[in-house]
């Protein structure tokens, strides 16, 4: 198996092999041993040949979970490894979602939709520019009487409609409660894009203040959870008995 295969995929391949063995194990002893070898050896070898660190919290968590499951099959629960692995899994369980660089499902869906609308808006603008080139030299008051002029009107209407949906989705992302660090990064990047796209004028200060307040309100719960989590671990460190 190629070294480029992510750790999560290797782990899933191993689990899939385990499920297949449970579901399809032959009755005959010799056939059973050969079946297990054929099904389990490839994903096992892929895990043995793994080199390099895990890519993120989720890979670390899943690797530890799999190692814990395999070790329990060999009755390691009375060894020193058991509480150490459980402690590591407990920490990652608490932090993996908050510190994930992935977008939460709802924000991820909205961000994907925005990308689609943004691309379509760009296409419509290019089409409109092309039509306007063909209308160059014609009195603007007569555009509506020409096929190109009517096409331009349709393109303008579509641009407005797509832009309205895009802005509504951006509003949704801005006010939606932040769940991961990926959400936080995306929200801040989107706000930076908004400010670059819409330079602030004196008449816009109230609307800008409202949007800033919405953004901060959506981020605050995530920041509070991270702060509480940090406090919990500090308390645990203080309460830990000396060695």
Image (tube, rainbow, N blue to C red):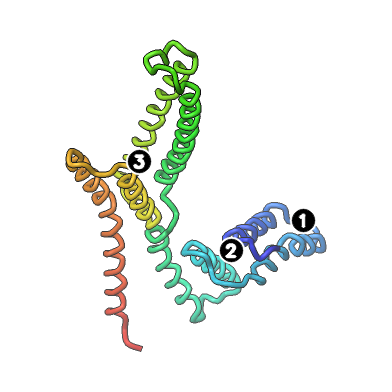
Picture layout, residue 113 above or below residue 212: above
Q: Between residues 227 and 181, which one lies in front from this camera angle? A: 181
Disc 1, SS: loop
Which residue sits furthest front? Answer: 137
Disc 2, SS: helix
> Residue at image x 42%, y 61%?
96
What is the CA distance from the residue labelled 2 to the residue labelled 3?
A: 34 Å
- Is 3 on the left-hand or right-hand side of 137? right
Picture layout, residue 223 above or below residue 213: below
Disc marking residue 7 = 2
- In primary-sequence order, the first of circles 2 and 1 is 2
> Residue at image x 43%, y 58%?
101
Tell which tag, 2 or 3, sits nearer the viewer. Answer: 3
- In primary-sequence order, the first of circles 3 and 1 is 1
Res 232 quadrant in image: bottom left
Residue 190, horizontal then vertical, whole percent: 36, 48
What residue did someone put label 1 on? 26
- In primary-sequence order, the first of circles 2 and 3 is 2
Label 1: how many Cα within 10 Å (few below 14, some 14–19, many 20+): some
Residue 62, horizontal then vertical, whole percent: 52, 63
């Amino acid at each position: 198996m190629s070294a480029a295969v992510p750790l999560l995929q290797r782990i899933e391949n191993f689990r899939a092999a385990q499920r297949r063995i449970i579901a399809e194990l032959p009755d005959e002893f010799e056939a059973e041993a050969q079946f297990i070898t054929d099904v389990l050896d490839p994903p096992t070898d892929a895990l043995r040949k793994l080199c390099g660190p895990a890519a993120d919290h989720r890979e670390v968590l899943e690797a530890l979970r799999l190692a814990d499951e395999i070790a329990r099959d060999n009755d390691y629960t009375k060894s020193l490894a058991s509480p150490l692995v459980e402690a590591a899994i407990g920490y990652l369980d608490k932090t993996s979602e908050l510190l994930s660089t992935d977008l939460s499902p709802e924000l991820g869906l909205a961000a994907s939709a925005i990308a689609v609308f943004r691309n379509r808006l760009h296409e419509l603008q290019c089409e409109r520019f092309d039509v306007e080139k063909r209308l160059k030299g014609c009195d603007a008051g007569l555009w509506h009487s020409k096929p190109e002029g009517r096409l331009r009107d349709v393109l303008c209407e579509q641009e407005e409609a797509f832009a309205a949906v895009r802005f509504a989705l951006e509003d949704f992302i801005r006010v939606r409660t932040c769940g991961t660090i990926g959400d936080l990064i995306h929200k801040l990047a989107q706000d930076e894009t908004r400010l670059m796209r819409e330079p602030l004028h004196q008449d816009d200060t109230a609307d800008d203040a409202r949007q800033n307040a919405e953004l901060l309100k959506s981020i605050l719960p995530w920041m509070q959870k991270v702060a509480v989590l940090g406090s919990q671990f500090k308390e645990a460190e203080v309460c830990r008995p000396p060695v």
